[in-house]
Amino acid sequence: MELFFAIFFSFPVIIFSTLLTLCVLYWLVAAVGILHIDCLDIDFDGIDAPSSTGLGGLLLKFGFNEVPMTLIITLISLLGWILSYLSTRYVLIHIFDMSWLYYLSSVTVFIASFIVATYLTAWLIKPIRPFFNKLGSENSHRTFLGQAVIIRSSIVNEQKGEAIYEDGGAGLILQVRSDDRYQFKRGDKAILLRYDSLSNSYEVINESDFMENVK
């Protein structure tokens, strides 16, 4: 056990250990429905746009744009940890006393582990990609218009914002936008007014204003 923790906190394993620990904490917190962390309010919509170059091109190449990003990060972290741990356990540990060679080899192991983990993740998610595509089509944006949501981000403006739509299950997290007329804060209720396909987000208005317009 002592050897395990020594490797767990050693370079390069510590990088994947940290990522994997954060992923485990994320899923645990999300599982009990109390996830309200602003640092996770990352907008990946721009990455999902078709692109033949850059990060968008890589995501399309591996099919990562069709699967939740949290799942992708978790798989890469787990596989990268396994690969780097085994490499350290059976190779790097024997050259630990040779500092320059150890760190040079460690960097190589980290890069190789990340690349291999990425390809393995792409291979693992391939069978489940159709499921997420089907799930996305069933939950078409049109079915959400006029529905009430609860704001989950600290702010909502024309650039960013998130809300939760209670679907009777774990809930769906939607990207929402609003102009300066509304000062939404976490926990407020809002109504989905229209959908913007370019930003994959919904324009929201205050629930009371919506009810007045309906009357």
Image: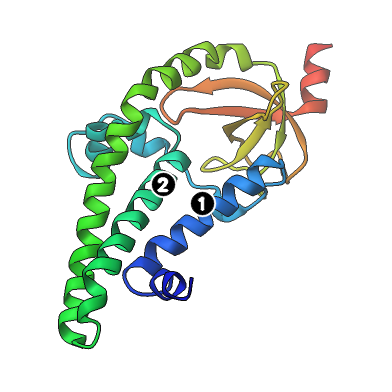
Dot 2: few (<14), some (14–19), or many (≥20) neighbours within 10 Å? some
Left or right of residue 116: residue 17:
right
Quadrant in the rendering for residue 95: bottom left
| 64 versus 153 height, above or below | above
| 83 versus 174 height, above or below | below
Secondary structure at numbered mark 2: helix
Residue shown at the point (45%, 58%) measured from the top left: 19
Secondary structure at numbered mark 1: helix
In primary-sequence order, the first of circles 1 and 2 is: 1
| 191 versus 18 height, above or below | above
Outermost residue toward the front?
Answer: 1
Left or right of residue 126: residue 170:
right
Quadrant in the rendering for residue 162: top right
Coloring scheme of the render?
Answer: rainbow
Evaluate if marks 1 and 2 touch, with contact meaning CB atoms under 8 Å apart: yes
- Taking depth in this image into account, of 167 and 19 the one nearest to the observer is 19
- Taking depth in this image into account, of 174 and 171 the one nearest to the observer is 171
Residue marked by disc 1: 23
Q: Amino acid at mark 2?
A: Ile
Residue marked by disc 2: 73
Left or right of residue 155: residue 62:
left
Dot 1: few (<14), some (14–19), or many (≥20) neighbours within 10 Å? some
Residue 101: % across, % down: 15, 81
- Taking depth in this image into account, of 157 and 170 the one nearest to the observer is 170
Residue shown at the point (27%, 40%) measured from the top left: 120
